Amino acid sequence: MTNEWERYSRQMLFNPIGAEGQKMLSESKVLIVGMGALGTVASNHLARSGVGHIVFCDRDYVEASNLQRQSLFDEQDALDMLPKAVAAEKKLKSINSSIVVEGIVTDVTAENIHGLMHGVDIVMDGTDNFSTRYLLNDVAFQYGVPFIYGGAVSSRGMGAMFIPGETPCLRCLFPTYDASGQTCDTIGVLSMVVDAVASQEALMAIKYLTGNKDQIERSLYTIDMWRNDHFSMGFGKAVPACPTCGTKEFPSLKASEGDRITTLCGRETVQILHSGRLDLNHWASVLKPVVQEVKETPFLVKAILKEGETLVLFPDGRTLVQGTEDVMRAKSLFTKYVGS
């Protein structure tokens, strides 16, 4: 047994996994979308468990307010304004250098999600909004791979694993969602709830990848750790008219012009997608004479405007307009400083 395998000895001594299960983990690939609270905890478990290939995407950068619950980041990451995907990749590679870790700085959309699915065995939810979850649910069921859902807010959490051909999908359970619902940025969240939900997500992935699918509960579990409440709701049957697992229309995979502008709920931020990539050096020089302050890193340009808002430009063509949820004002500022 090599040193690489000896590091997993305590996990391999657990009989349901053993040497064969560990080998299966080493040959597996997991896609995580969202490297915030849930994503950092889940990816940490998967990396330490020896999942052979972990790829994750995130559109944001590390800020001080993330450090309370996003366990892979530290104060220096926030000071450096590192993209979360970059900071997480660095930390996970230092945790386990024997696996493949890929961090991608991007907003996952209907246009680019297919390019992320090659060889993926499980799609895992690390997001904070149902619009993206529907997208992940649709692509997972189109490709016939499981989708693990998780959510945490306040002291409450929930999660489930949806397996194409065997269970209903997320859209069967939640046909619609309230876009103005509660989020971590509006009512807060306890880090312990995040840990519990993300650990359960990682555990479901480990069970599935090691051939222990029969140990995965076919239900939506919910917890309230402050009130000491927990219960599970059985899935029931898939909905025949469900556009994802029933009629297989996969509506969230159909890109639209409206996808260029996204309001990040509860964050006073509007994301606008530019028509092409952005040269950060060019935009730093363009913005410096006309705004209050510009901060430049290899990964983004942050411009504090005289109007009070902030623009954050990424090389993949995204701009965050921070300080407003008014789409028209965000578009006006974007057009004034960046263009169409």
Image (cartoon, rainbow, N blue to C red):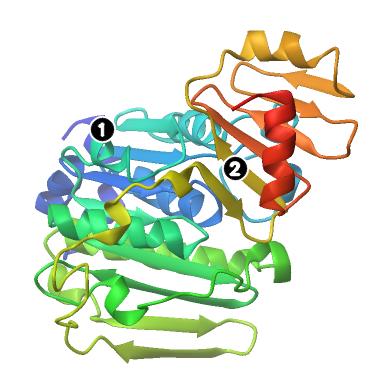
Of the two numbered discs 1 and 2 in the rendering, the one whose residue sits closer to the viewer: 2
Q: Is residue 136 above or below residue 239?
A: above
The residue tagged 2 is 271
**Do we see residue 75 in this rendering?**
no
Q: Is residue 129 above or below residue 53?
A: below
**Percent position of residue 264, x then y:** 61, 53
Tell me which corner region of the image, top left, top right, bottom left or bottom right, holds residue 136.
bottom left
| Other residues around mark 2 within 10 Å, as few (<14) / some (14–19) / many (≥20) | many
The residue tagged 1 is 4
Question: Which amino acid, mark 2?
Answer: Gln
Q: Residue at x 24, y 72 (%)?
A: 169
Q: Residue at x 85, y 18 (%)?
A: 290
Q: Is residue 93 above or below residue 26?
A: above
Label 1, label 2: how far apart the Cα atoms are: 42 Å
Of residues 143 and 30, the one nearer the viewer is 143
Query: Circle 2 — which element?
Result: strand
**Do we see residue 49 in this rendering?**
yes
